[in-house]
Amino acid sequence: FGASFDRWSAKNTVHVDDLSRNFALNPQSGLECTAYKRRRRNAEHDRELLELAAYLEYIAEQHDDFTKLDHKNWRESLQRAIDRRN
């Protein structure tokens, strides 16, 4: 049982939540996103999860150790990565 979890660690794990207090004990692993509210006026235009998925794919491809990353500005990091590719 324990061996199956050996591959997961702070180096390859990101805690995604809309409340930063939920990762207060591990702030370097936390990524705060906006809360999804289905009833919000522009809910059909909510792209947060799409952008978040793109960011997670980017860091998985480019970084071996997520503990060295600062996720506070993840949107800007994603935009810079997109700009470099274009």
Image (tube, helix red, strand yellow):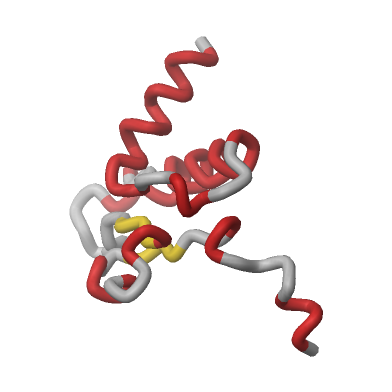
The quarter of the displayed image where residue 26 is located: bottom left
The residue drawn where x is 32% and y is 32% is: 76
Q: Is 73 situated above or below 49? A: above
Residue reaching furthest to the bottom: 1
Q: How far across and down, in percent of the image, does residue 32 sit? A: 30, 57
Q: Is residue 34 among the parts visible in the rendering?
A: yes
Image check: 44 left or right of 12?
Answer: left
Q: Residue at x 43, y 41 (%)?
A: 51
Identify which residue, 64 or 16, lies in the foreground: 64
Residue plotted at (62% across, 44% down): 64
Question: Which image quadrant: the N terminus?
Answer: bottom right
How many marks the image carries: the answer is 0
In the rendered image, is residue 38 in sight? no
As drawn, the residue found furthest toward the top would be 86
Residue 38 location in percent, x, y? 30, 63
Instruction: Give percent across and percent down for residue 48.
Output: 37, 48
- Viewed as shown, does residue 52 lie left or right of 59? left
On the image, the x and y values in percent for residue 69 come to 42, 45
